[in-house]
Image: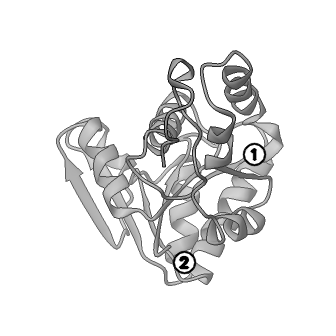
Amino acid sequence: MKTICVYAGSNLGNHKEFKQKANELGELIAERGYRLVYGGSSIGLMGEVANQVLARGGEAIGVIPKGLFIGEMAHPHLTQLIEVNSMHERKAKMSELADGFIALPGGIGTFEELFEIYCWAQIGIHHKPIGVLNVQNYYQSFIDLVRHSVDEEFANPSHLRLLSIATSPDVLLDKMETYTPPILGNKWKQLDGQKAQR
């Protein structure tokens, strides 16, 4: 990995540990020599990660749709700010630039980004590591939901191995650095017996 895409809330949330772990992640991204790509905001957990990367001499690239957010939200000190025409282009550009993805706590937009990049891994569009930073068990419901889809046979058990999950940034990055894409079982139960997808 050279560039890590971070999905995170544009608010700080109601636990001080959310901000603390966002800061730790930003520090480690810079210290380990990675480049950050993210949504470009100066506020919330997004801004905290970028601030720490920049404070330690790292590179931070923001991707923001033109005219969608007020100007004050765009981080003024980024290495590069890329403006695109839509949210779809934003996600595509971040995916194109990234070698791995990390989801911090966040709201609906963060969930949507995480689910999309997870779906893309499941169907083989990419084979990049996906990390979930489960601070304060924030993502436990998400993890349970994915497991429920497996239990109800809408997803294959092998799809669970597409996610790297940890409660601390250093452990999560360690997992992502040693990630090997799993051999995925057949996604479609009615086609059992046919060659497994990769």
In which quarter of the view is residue 139 placed? top right
Q: Judge by depth and name the residue closer to the eye, 69 or 31.
A: 31
| Outermost residue toward the front in this view | 193
| Kind of residue at disc 1 | Asn
Q: Is residue 35 above or below residue 184?
A: below
Q: What x and y, as percent, mark residue 31?
A: 62, 82
The residue drawn where x is 24% and y is 58% is: 82
| Kind of residue at disc 2 | Ala
Q: Judge by depth and name the residue closer to the eye, 70 or 56.
A: 56
Q: What x and y, as percent, mark residue 171?
A: 77, 66
The residue drawn where x is 66% and y is 57% is: 22
2 and 1 marks in contact (CB < 8 Å)? no
* Mark-to-mark CA distance, 2 and 1: 25 Å
Q: Is residue 26 above or below residue 115?
A: below
- Residue 69 located left or right of residue 113: left
Q: Judge by depth and name the residue closer to the eye, 130 or 64.
A: 130
In which quarter of the view is residue 32 placed? bottom right
Give the structural element (helix, strand or loop) at label 2.
Answer: helix
Residues packed near mark 1 inside 10 Å, few (<14), some (14 to 19) or many (20 plus): many
In which quarter of the view is residue 107 placed? top right
Q: How is the image coloured?
A: one colour
**Labels in figure, total:** 2
The numbered disc on residue 134 is 1
| Outermost residue toward the left in this view | 85
Return the disc, 2 or 1, that comes first in the chain's sequence.
Answer: 2
Select label 2 or label 1 by which is in front. Answer: 1
Q: What x and y, as percent, mark residue 145?
A: 70, 24
The residue drawn where x is 28% and y is 53% is: 93
Q: What x and y, as percent, mark residue 33?
A: 54, 83
Question: Mark 2 — residue?
Answer: 55
